Image: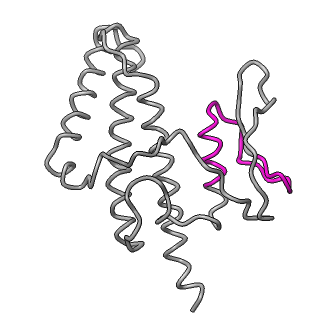
């Protein structure tokens, strides 16, 4: 979008928003989205999984990696394992930790998406539809935010709403990893 006048940029963003809304409201998308009600659990609250390396507890702490900005990371209390690069949000660090420590979790026990009682195949299809919807909604928020910053809208998507969508997406990604692990377990036991 470089080289566009402010008016052209606003028109381009408005067109992107229209396309995203059309996708979100399309009959196909509505059919493929099993639900937009993910459960009563706050996606920003994340219980930490046990460390796959040593079964120790993960500890969420502020990181000193960037003194200018507060960052978060999870470290194992017993070994040197960490969640990855420090992140801006504690819930992101916690979900990253859980994403690399899958052994103590089951997809059917996640507090979101209504996966208990579903086979790995059915759970995969459910999360796949939810995840596609979340990606579109996050893209819509991003385009609306850019349009607001470009002066083409008086409506700015709320930061907490966008954060919750991003958290739900990370939960869905975690669910997919747990489902994949559940599918592989029966094969490993043969």
Q: Is residue 187 above or below residue 71?
A: below
Image point 66% across, 57% down: which residue? 49
| Total numbered circles | 0
Image point 38% across, 71% down: which residue? 117
Among all residues in the image, which is located at the extreme bottom?
A: 190
Q: How is the image coloured?
A: one colour
Question: How far from the left and from the top, in percent, is residue 94?
Answer: 64, 45
**Nearer the observer, 48 or 159:** 48
Splitting the image into 4 quarters, where does residue 91 fall? Answer: top right
Residue 34 shown in magenta: no
Q: Is residue 153 above or below residue 42?
A: above
Question: How far from the left and from the top, in percent, is residue 186?
Answer: 53, 84
Q: Is residue 119 above or below residue 59?
A: below
Q: Is residue 91 above or below residue 18?
A: below
> In the image, is 37 to the left or to the right of 106?
left
Question: How far from the left and from the top, in percent, is residue 107?
Answer: 49, 64
Image point 59% across, 64% down: which residue? 105
Quadrant the N terminus occupies: top left
Image point 18% across, 36% down: which residue? 22
Quadrant the C terminus occupies: bottom right
Among all residues in the image, which is located at the extreme left?
A: 27
Splitting the image into 4 quarters, where does residue 25 fall? Answer: top left
**Nearer the observer, 21 or 170:** 170
> In the image, is 62 to the left or to the right of 161?
right
Q: Which residues are magenta?
A: 75-98
Residue 77 shown in magenta: yes
Question: How far from the left and from the top, in percent, is residue 69?
Answer: 71, 21
């Amino acid at each position: 979008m470089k080289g566009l006048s402010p008016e052209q940029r606003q028109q381009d963003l408005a067109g992107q928003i229209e396309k995203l809304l059309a996708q979100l409201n399309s009959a196909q998308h509505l059919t493929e989205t099993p639900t937009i009600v993910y459960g009563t659990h706050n996606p920003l609250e994340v219980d930490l999984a046990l460390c796959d390396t040593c079964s120790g507890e993960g500890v969420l702490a502020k990181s000193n990696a960037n003194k200018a900005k507060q960052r978060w990371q999870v470290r194992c209390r017993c070994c040197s394992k960490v969640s990855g690069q420090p992140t801006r949000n504690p819930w992101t660090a916690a979900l990253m930790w859980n994403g690399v420590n899958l052994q103590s979790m089951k997809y059917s026990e996640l507090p979101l998406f209504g996966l208990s009682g579903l086979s790995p195949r059915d759970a995969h299809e459910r999360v796949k539809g939810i995840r596609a919807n979340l990606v579109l909604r996050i893209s819509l928020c991003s385009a609306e935010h850019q349009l607001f910053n470009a002066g083409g809208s008086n409506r700015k998507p709320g930061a907490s709403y966008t954060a919750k969508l991003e958290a739900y997406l990370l939960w869905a990604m975690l669910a997919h990893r747990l489902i994949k692990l559940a599918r592989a377990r029966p094969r490993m036991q043969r």
